[in-house]
Amino acid sequence: MFIRKRRKPVSEINVVPYIDVMLVLLVIFMATAPLVTQGVKVDLPKAEAQTIESEDEAMMIVSVDAQGLYYLNVGDDPSSAMSAQAIADIVKTRLSVSPTTPVVVNGDGKVSYEKVIDLMVLLQRAGVPSVGLMTDPNEQS
């Protein structure tokens, strides 16, 4: 006679299919991650902005007024409008002398968003590693 042994139920999980799915997802994320990171790299201020402290050098403030004209707080006359190329040249020169100089964008609330982005792209091409955005501490939303 043939005696049949009773088998106990196996309480193990086969993790091989889960590992396969995880590796496929990892490859997909690795392939798509470089495509997603387009744009201008900026360090945006937090909701509760803190003052930037600079001990050694004065920060460069690049402003855009409501008409879309650019101004720089460095130079002979900080209240006169400058061309985009002139600002890029001055910023590049200042950063070559002192690369840790902070650069901040001060944009008028009525200027188009496109003008502010154009200015940040201009600063990025001039070699600015990170751009701060100025806020008015007295304004409440």
Image (tube, rainbow, N blue to C red):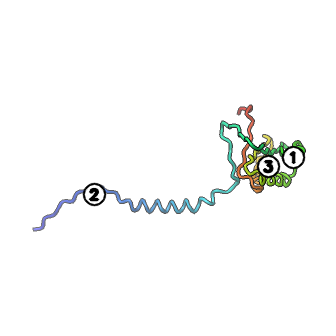
Q: Which label sits in the foreground, 1 or 2?
A: 1
Asked if marks 3 and 1 touch (Cβ < 8 Å), the reply is no
N-terminal-most mark, 3 or 1: 1
Residue name at image x 63 percent, y 57 percent? 36
Which residue is disc 2 drawn over? Answer: 10
**In terms of secondary structure, where does tag 2 sit?**
loop
On screen, residue 127 above or below 137 = below
Which residue is disc 1 drawn over? Answer: 75
Q: Which label sits in the foreground, 3 or 1?
A: 1
Whether residue 79 sits left or right of residue 53 in the image: it is right
Residue name at image x 71 percent, y 39 percent? 53
State the image quarter where residue 29 is shown: bottom right
Please identify the residue farthest to the front as the structure is shown: 56
N-terminal-most mark, 3 or 2: 2
Total labels: the figure holds: 3
Q: Amino acid at mark 3?
A: Lys
Q: Horizontal and vertical percent for residue 43?
A: 68, 47
Residue name at image x 64 percent, y 56 percent? 37
Q: Horizontal and vertical percent for residue 31?
A: 57, 63
Cα separation, mark 1 vs mark 2, equals: 79 Å
Cα separation, mark 3 vs mark 2, equals: 66 Å
Cα separation, mark 3 vs mark 1, equals: 22 Å
Which residue is disc 3 drawn over? Answer: 115
Quarter holding the N terminus? bottom left
